[in-house]
Image (cartoon, helix red, strand yellow):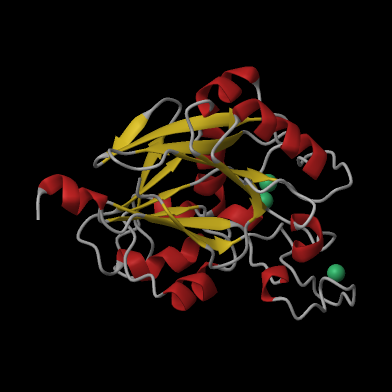
Amino acid sequence: MTRSAALNSNCHAIFLGTGTSTGVPVIGCDCPVCTSNDQRNQRLRSSLWLKIHGLSLLVDAGPDLRHQALRENIRSVDAVLYTHGHLDHVAGFDELRAFCWRRDRPLPIYANPGCMNTLQSMFAWAFSPNNTHGGYVKPDPHIVRDTFFIGPLRITPLPVFHGTVETNGYLFEAESQKKIAYIPDAKVIPNDTIALLQKCDILIIDALREQPHPTHLCVEETLSIIEQVQPQQAYLTHISHETNHQDLESRLPSNIKIAYDQLTISLDL
Ligand SMILES: [Zn+2]
Ligand SMILES: [Zn+2]
Ligand SMILES: [Zn+2]
């Protein structure tokens, strides 16, 4: 097999979770979505698993990480990229232990300065110089503001506004691969980030629900972002129990789908 053929094979993005911070169903809720038999209405907390050129990358590590990793049989992780410090994206930090046990070196984690601060105060023991016990998470922190590389993968942070929390999406580019952008939490996408999104083939973006929300994009706002970016394919994520998958998707243009847990996108061109 030639090098380029090897690089091309089996690159995927897998949705580990597509729900908002409560997950769907919501505890104790009897609404039609929470009680739906449609599997696509059952949503763990939002996270994406990228398998690109032999790398295994997590975007966010929320409170459902253990369940997600067992379900998808994730056996190793080469790096974790965090979008922001909200609990639904960071609360699975301690589950990263199992991946650290099978590594020779600390686990690289990437985050903006605000999110890294949150991680370091929330999980201080892991970042402490006294963290010498073999059983704990051993993070290798990288604060990112500009484009960086993990192996052959070019990754660009995409700053967005999401309430008061410093938040990134990420754009992933690799040779012979579709360019994919992931923005699970946002209310406003600044113009500089819209410009960076112009080259993405696949856009995965927050669309919490149809009704407006103070810190998340609602469906109408998300559709206007997609209109500006014109990706080949867009996927809505970070969905609340106010959205019924079938009902909303039937009203969307064909290049816009609603993501659901375990949906797998091929990134090969
Ligand atoms: Zn969130
Ligand atoms: Zn409900
Ligand atoms: Zn958030």
Residue at image location 63% in from the left, 18% down from the top: 191
Q: Which of 207 and 60 is in front in this view?
A: 207
Is residue 163 visible to the viewer in this orientation of the structure?
no
Please tell me which residue lies in front, 233 or 180: 233
Outermost residue, left side: 1
Q: Is residue 105 in view from this perspective?
A: yes
Task: Classify residue 194 as left or right of residue 248.
Answer: left
Give the residue at the far front of this rendering. 254
Q: Which of 247 and 241 is in front in this view?
A: 247
Question: Which quarter of the figure has residue 249?
Answer: bottom right
Residue 188 rendering spot, x and y as whole percentages: 72, 30
| Whether residue 95 is situated above or below residue 110 in the rendered picture | below
Q: Is residue 168 left or right of residue 248?
A: left
Residue at image position (79%, 44%) is 219
Residue 30 at x, y percent in the picture: 89, 77
Residue 42 lies in quadrant: bottom right
Report the side of 140 relative to 159 (left or right): left
x, y percent for residue 67: 53, 75
| Quadrant assignment for the C terminus | top left
In the picture shown, does residue 32 fall above or below 117? below
What residue is drawn where x is 31% and y is 55%? 78
Quadrant for the N terminus in the image:
bottom left
Left or right side of 2 for 168: right
Indicate the position of residue 234 as horizontal and vertical percent values: 60, 44
Q: Total label count?
A: 0
Frontmost residue, 90 versus 199: 199
Q: Residue drawn at (31%, 65%), measured in percent from left and top?
A: 76
